[in-house]
Image (spheres, rainbow, N blue to C red):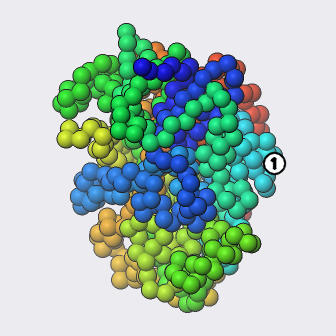
Amino acid sequence: MSEAFDYIIVGGGSAGCVLAARLSEDPDVSVLLLEAGGRDNNFLFHWPAGFAKMTKGIASWGWSTVPQEHMMGREVWFTQAKVIGGGSSINAQVYTRGNQADYDNWAENYGCDGWSYCEVLPYFKRSEFNECFENTFHGREGDLGVSMPRATLPICDAFIEAAKEFGIPHNPDFNGSQQAGVGYYQLTQKNAKRSSTSVAFLKSAEKRRNLRVITQAKATRIVLKKGRAVGVEYLHKGRQRLSETTREIVLTSGAIGSPNLLLLSGIGPAQHLTEVGIEVKHDLAGVGLNLQDHIDVCAIAELSGNYSYDGWDTFPKSTFAALQYLFLKSGPVASSLFETGGFWFSNKEQTQPNIQFHLGQGSGLEKGITRINGAGITLNSAHVRPRSRGTVRLNKSNHFVPLIDPNYWSDDHDLEMAYRGLEIAREILAQPALKKYVKREVLPGSDLSSREQLFGYLCKMAKTDHHPVGTCKMGRDELSVVDPKLKVIGLDGLRVCDSSVMPQITSSNTNAPTIMIAEKGADLLRNRNPLPAANLPDNRISSGRREASS
């Protein structure tokens, strides 16, 4: 016998936790949240430096991409969270929203009415409890802790100075009036702990009697009846179960999980479904298309002294670091390890920043990245306006292991930007401000300089920034999967509300935008009037070029 709920949310990640908390604010509705992963009970989910363990497999699905045609056939490790809180429980906690132009583009070029920057800014602010900023761009009444880093090393300040010597101005707030510049990232932390959506939103909401959260529940099918979504089948404790809805089902399983579940349910391109043996229930061509991701490449430098956090994960230093964190809320454990960076232009023709940098306070911090002998630092660069598009498809031999093909560098422009980003990173590391700290460039190394020499290095070392989006695209064209109210086109009672609905990727880390989508989605589901649009001077944000030339 099945149970019925007003709303069933499938996926307890960054968006799902927010949505469950917001919908259950109404005591007259019942909400079920299904999460395939487990609880975030391990301390590593809450200590900021735990991120370094997460990209190496803890609380993730363990997926990789299909062999990448334009990367010499390499399969790229593709971390996707498998825990309550999703990406917000395992990411590097960087809180960036992107550029105003990203959202204006959604509205103007993709037909996403209601999603321009001035219209979504109030939803960013509604979530935010910012410890440092309270102004036109920031809020202090929300649940999501946002703070400045508290465990950076002197080499971070030296990096900022080096970037300024290169020509990139200091920017104290990448989420403010302009994106361009270099400085410290704001982090989703509160009181020196990770502020995941599980902690910030769901923990208190779970006390409500009208919200039920079931973990270790793997959704297997959306049940359709006469063109309407009426229930969700899922595996829990070895048994197949069914929960029904009296209102709506909302998919919040991310850019891989949400299209995968639609395809499993017979919702997607008819030809593909037929090829993999799934009965076609609703032919929707765009499901699983439009996959976009940021891919970064790194330069690693050996330091002339113990100026980074390398070596602090070994005994007995690790014990001292844990005690320092527990009693003083400082030291290596209080660091997310990637807390300094910035946004800049690949060339003078760019009107908005298109390269993002993350400075890692060590080497070998992420899976697949070399750990050097001694102390080192890592400078990642990523092209944040990629043109390449990929797919998520069902695996004919195992429908529950998706075929992920980001199709990295299928557009030659993206590869050119990878070269350019790496070039800028190497130039910054060679600036005078870092001379005291940097002994030599280890990777790619001074012996590699030409494009031909560097191509193999890029193919070997490039990695995902863990920002997949776009596979259930919002819009009004023939490949759109949801409309601007996040309703699955052609079906009733079914919406998608996560990063998969982005028609084009934001030019930054994607966790904050995903939380915003859930905030706005909650109002759409509750049929509330949207929050009043922000009133910004000239309805514009500076590109940063004027500041860069001054």
Residue 244 is at least partly visible in this image: yes
* Viewer-closest of 20 and 298: 20
Dividing the image into 4 quarters, which one contains the N terminus? top left
Q: Residue furthest top?
A: 226
Look at the picture and state if 521 lies above or below 402. Answer: above
Q: Quadrant of residue 139?
A: top right
Q: Nearer the viewer, residue 385 or 121?
A: 121
Is 401 on the left-hand or right-hand side of 129?
A: left
Location of residue 11 in the rendering, given as x and y in whole percent from the top left corner: 48, 37
Query: Which quarter of the figure has residue 525?
Result: top right
Task: Residue at 37% x, 9% y: name it.
Answer: 226
In front here: 181 or 51? 51
Most distant residue in the right direction: 134
Left/right of residue 453 with respect to residue 95 in the rendered view: left
Residue bearing mark 1:
134
Element under disc 1: loop
Vertically, is 25 above or below 359?
Answer: above
Q: At 51% across and 66% down in the image, what residue appears?
A: 52
Give the quarter of the image for residue 420. Answer: bottom left
Query: What residue appears at the point 24 percent right and 41 percent down from the top-left corner?
Result: 398
The residue at 44%/42% (across/down) is 216
How many numbered discs?
A: 1
**Would you say 147 lies left or right of 238 here?**
right
The percent position of residue 197, horizontal first and vertical second, equals 61, 45
Depicted 472 relative to depicted 449: above or below: above
The image quadrant where one finds the C terminus is: bottom right
Please indicate, yes or no, whether residue 545 appears anywhere in the rendered image. no
Across and down, in percent, residue 518 comes to: 59, 34
Q: Residues within 10 Å of mark 1 (few under 14, many from 20)?
A: some
At label 1, which amino acid type do we have? Glu
